[in-house]
Amino acid sequence: MTVQIILASTSPRRKELLDQIKVTYAVNPVDLDETPRLNETPLAYVRRLAAEKSAACIAQIGSAATPVLAADTAVVLGNQIMGKPKDQADALSMLTQLSGKTHQVYTAISLRGRHHHQAVSITQVSFRPLTKLEMLAYWHSGEPVDKAGSYAIQGLGSVFVESIEGSFSGVVGLPLFETADLLAKQGIDLFK
């Protein structure tokens, strides 16, 4: 099978979403410092990281002959970017802050090939109030360990989500509507 894109990520969720829309890909992950810059807005942050990841991947492989797709997802409450938890206390702190509130999930995608295109999905996610026992049990499930905001909407964390307004796949880590649009701009037709 012909590879249509290079995925600059090892995320199993991004792979599953690309599989869902029948995009063939090779994986070439990059490792970058994901620390937000001083006074960087959440939108600027995710756009910058996605663009830096796709550029770093092209630098690694030495060519843009096959388009490179990179993405970055951030959970945002107010203007605070919530990354992956450092430990149990950090995860419980994040979940406590998200409890009973609406937050945003920003996912930026960057596709480099003949041209560089970017898109961003912003989704509103509302959590029901959470109890301390639930949050602790959820931490012990292992699911929050490597997830932005300490939860996975596609897993057990879905029971905390009262509603979403926007892209479910964007919250998972790769907004499929925007991804399909960028792929079309690179000449990749998903229906051929």
Image (spheres, rainbow, N blue to C red):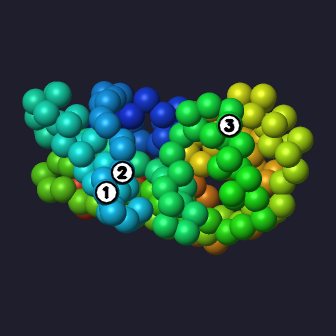
Decide if residue 131 is in sight here: yes
Q: What residue type is labelled 2?
A: Pro
Q: Distance from label 3 to label 2 (Cα)?
A: 21 Å
Q: Circle 1 sits on which residue?
A: 38
Q: Is label 2 in a helix, a strand or a loop?
A: loop
Q: Residue at x 58, y 63 (%)?
A: 77
Q: How crowded is mark 2: few (under 14 residues within 10 Å), some or many (20 or more)?
A: some
Q: Which of 49 and 15 is in front in this view?
A: 49
Q: Distance from label 1 to label 2 (Cα)?
A: 7 Å
Of the numbered discs 3 and 1, the one sitting upstream in the chain is: 1
Q: Circle 2 sits on which residue?
A: 36
> Quadrant where the N terminus lies?
top left
State the mark number for residue 1.
Answer: none
Q: How many marks?
A: 3
Q: Circle 3 sits on which residue?
A: 89
Q: Which residue is drawn at 30% across and 53% down?
A: 37
Q: What residue type is labelled 1?
A: Leu
Q: Residue at x 49, y 40 (%)?
A: 14
Between tags 3 and 2, which lies in front?
3
Q: Distance from label 3 to label 1 (Cα)?
A: 24 Å
Q: Nearer the viewer, residue 51 or 34?
A: 34
Q: Position of residue 68 (x, y in %)?
A: 26, 42
Q: Residues within 10 Å of mark 3 (few under 14, many from 20)?
A: few
Q: What residue type is labelled 3?
A: Ala
Of the numbered discs 3 and 2, the one sitting upstream in the chain is: 2
Q: Which residue is drawn at 63% across and 40% down?
A: 90
Q: Horizontally, is 149 left or right of 29 in the view?
A: right
Residue 25 sits above or below residue 108 on the image? above
The single residue placed furthest to the left in the displayed view is: 62
Q: Horizontally, is 130 left or right of 33 in the view?
A: right
